[in-house]
Amino acid sequence: MSVRPIRVFGDPVLRAVSAPIEHIDDGVRALIRDLLDTVELPGRAGVAAPQIGVGLRAFSYNIDGDIGYVINPTLVEVSGEPETVGEGCLSVPGLWHDAIRHPHAKVVGIDLDGQEIVLEGDGLLAQALQHETDHLDGRLYLERLSPEDRRIAMRQIRESDWF
């Protein structure tokens, strides 16, 4: 379908909890195609539906060339001691801060045929799974920063040319 523009910090859709997808129809299929097209651009590890203005529970991912999607994902497991990892977000352009994430994560959801999808991994995949499910719960990575880093990030946002 098409690469969709990314909504940025301040857009209310990014702070709302996304609704579950009840039925797979042509609209959902188009949403998934758009998510996949949008995540394929260089430098993108994931795109959640709210980031393209749609308040539904779905995201796409692009980890080391492995591109896919999950509908109605649930973060069912995180493990390992939480650690700080460098993180950015398409919806908060130009910022990069250390967020607190678990080194391992597991998400369960469905595909367009209603079949179960299980995504599980470490490193960047674990980080992306946590980051994208946060988006579906109306959370931005800024909430995962230390208080001092959050103050710095908010100042950077206020001073940015896109805010």
Image (cartoon, rainbow, N blue to C red):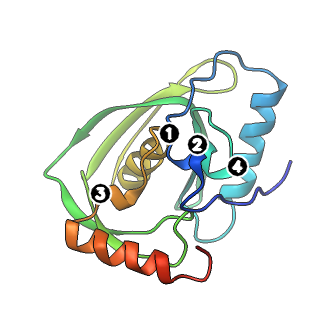
Task: Judge by depth and name the residue closer to the eye, 12 or 110.
Answer: 12
Residue 104, percent from left and from top: 27, 47
Q: Nearer the viewer, mark 3 or mark 2?
A: 3
Instruction: Measure how far apart labels 3 and 4 are at the Cα level.
Output: 26 Å
Amino acid type of the residue that numbered disc 1 sits on in the rendered structure: Leu
Are the residues at dot 4 and dot 2 in contact (C-beta closer than 8 Å)? Answer: no
Are there few (<14), some (14-19), or many (20+) residues within 10 Å of tag 3? some
Q: Nearer the N terminus, badge 4 or badge 2? A: 4
Amino acid type of the residue that numbered disc 4 sits on in the rendered structure: Leu
Amino acid type of the residue that numbered disc 3 sits on in the rendered structure: Arg
Are there few (<14), some (14-19), or many (20+) residues within 10 Å of tag 2? many
Disc 1 marks which residue?
Answer: 136
Task: Judge by depth and name the residue closer to the eye, 69 or 34.
Answer: 34
Q: Nearer the N terminus, badge 3 or badge 1? A: 1
Disc 2 marks which residue?
Answer: 59
- Is residue 129 among what the camera can see? yes
Q: Nearer the N terminus, badge 3 or badge 4? A: 4
Instruction: Measure how far apart labels 3 and 1 are at the Cα level.
Output: 15 Å
Disc 4 marks which residue?
Answer: 36
Amino acid type of the residue that numbered disc 2 sits on in the rendered structure: Phe
Disc 3 marks which residue?
Answer: 144
Are the residues at dot 3 and dot 1 in contact (C-beta closer than 8 Å)? Answer: no
Q: Is residue 4 left or right of residue 51?
A: right
Instruction: Measure how far apart labels 4 and 2 are at the Cα level.
Output: 9 Å
Residue 76, percent from left and from top: 33, 29
Residue 16, percent from left and from top: 52, 39
* Helix, strand or loop status at disc 2: strand
Residue at 52%, 79% (x, y): give it.
Answer: 94
Q: Nearer the viewer, mark 3 or mark 4?
A: 3
Are there few (<14), some (14-19), or many (20+) residues within 10 Å of tag 1? many
Q: Nearer the viewer, mark 1 or mark 2?
A: 1
